[in-house]
Image (cartoon, rainbow, N blue to C red):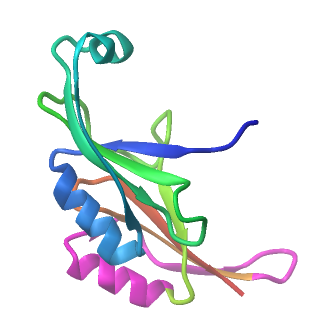
Amino acid sequence: MLRYVHTNIIARDAAKLVEFYKKVFDCKSIGETRDLSGEWLDQMTGVKNSHITGEHICLPGYGEDHPTLEIFSYDMVEGDIPHTNKIGIAHLAFETDDVEDKLKELLVAGGSQYGELVKTTYEDGRNAVFVYAADPEGNIIEIQSWS
């Protein structure tokens, strides 16, 4: 068996970021909270004296337990603000019926707009609406709609 399970976001404040994704993108708690530490975690992460807290939340539009966003906070963190053209995972994408309304909801919930909202027609005739935004911690989110 092989299946996709989760994407991890390391947050400054995991609880606050979990609430943002639940409110704006209809992610659901599934009872998978974490408070992890120990030698095994230090070995796996390569970080001495690791202590991780957070939660797995189920993504909308799928089953009751997977795939999830795994939003964790370490006691000590390092890193830069993400960019759309950075090597590695660049953004999370969510599809909605109304990009403009979802963007407004994101902004009210503490997110920010990252780029301009664009409308385009693909060569196959499909119309698309896209915008890059960011969650309250600067992680980039693409909001899209297709018709």
Q: Is residue 113 visible?
A: no
| Residue at 16% from the left image edge and 45% from the top image edge | 12
| Residue at 51% from the left image edge and 89% from the top image edge | 98
2 in magenta: no
Q: Taking 75 as reference, is 105 above or below it? A: below
Q: Quadrant of residue 61?
A: bottom right
Residue 2: image location, x then y, percent: 73, 37
Q: Viewer-proximal residue, 19 or 98?
A: 19
In-image side of 144 versus 24 (left or right): right
Single out the residue that lies furthest toward the right: 124
Q: Is residue 6 visible?
A: yes
Q: Viewer-proximal residue, 140 or 97?
A: 97
Q: Quadrant of residue 63?
A: bottom right
In-image side of 27 versus 66 (left or right): left
Residue 94: image location, x then y, percent: 52, 69
Residue 125: image location, x then y, percent: 84, 83
Q: Quadrant of the N terminus?
A: top right
What segment carries the magenta color?
A: 99-126
In-image side of 112 versus 142 (left or right): left
| Residue at 38% from the left image edge and 80% from the top image edge | 103
Q: Taking 83 as reference, is 59 above or below it? A: below
The number of discs equals 0
Single out the residue that lies furthest toward the left: 75
Q: Taking 75 as reference, is 84 above or below it? A: below
| Residue at 18% from the left image edge and 30% from the top image edge | 77
Q: Viewer-proximal residue, 36 or 112?
A: 36
112 in magenta: yes
Q: Viewer-proximal residue, 78 or 63?
A: 63
Q: Quadrant of residue 106?
A: bottom left
Q: Quadrant of the C terminus?
A: bottom right
